[in-house]
Image: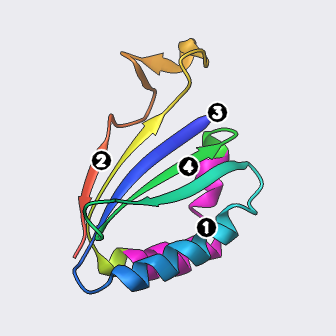
Amino acid sequence: MFALAAKYGIHPGYEDQAVELFTAFTKQTQLEPGNILYIVHRSSTNPQLFLIYELYTDKAAFDAHCRYPHFTHYVTQGLQRICKERHSEEYYPLEQDKDNLVSGYPQGSDEHDTNPMV
């Protein structure tokens, strides 16, 4: 299994648009082969902050997710335009393929990324 948790900070005034984009994107993502769970949360104290939890059968399923046309439409051409910051972390189950881990992290993977978006 492969999991990703991402936080999106949305520019003020675009919160409703973010909800619409996340809602439509979630419906499409949940139909993808290899997707186990895709859920978007909204902060109870900051309406501009969203947390996404994604779970896939493996990293290949996640990589395919990023190539679907609905990803381009809702994320690249939608959410990224109204997002002021994004931070994501990749997660693997503790019992998963320990031979694929280097210093606690999967080979070829960054510990995390921080992508400010304007």
Kindly identify the amino acid type of the residue bearing the numbered disc 1: Thr
Question: Residue 45 lies in what quarter of the image?
Answer: bottom left
Kindly identify the amino acid type of the residue bearing the numbered disc 2: Asp
Q: Residues within 10 Å of mark 1 (few under 14, many from 20)?
A: some
Instruction: Locate the C terminus by quadrant.
Output: bottom left
Q: Is residue 98 magenta?
A: no
User: Relative to residue 8, is residue 18 drawn left or right?
Assistant: right
Please determine whether, in this image, residue 27 is positioned above or below residue 66: below
- How far, Cα to Cα, is label 3 from label 2? 20 Å
How many dots with numbers? 4
User: Relative to residue 97, is residue 91 drawn left or right?
Assistant: left
Estimate the x, y position of residue 116 in percent, counting from the top left.
22, 63
- How far, Cα to Cα, is label 1 from label 3? 19 Å
Mark 3 / mark 4, whichever is N-terminal: 3
Residue extending furthest front? 44
Disc 2 designates what residue? 113
- How far, Cα to Cα, is label 3 from label 4? 11 Å
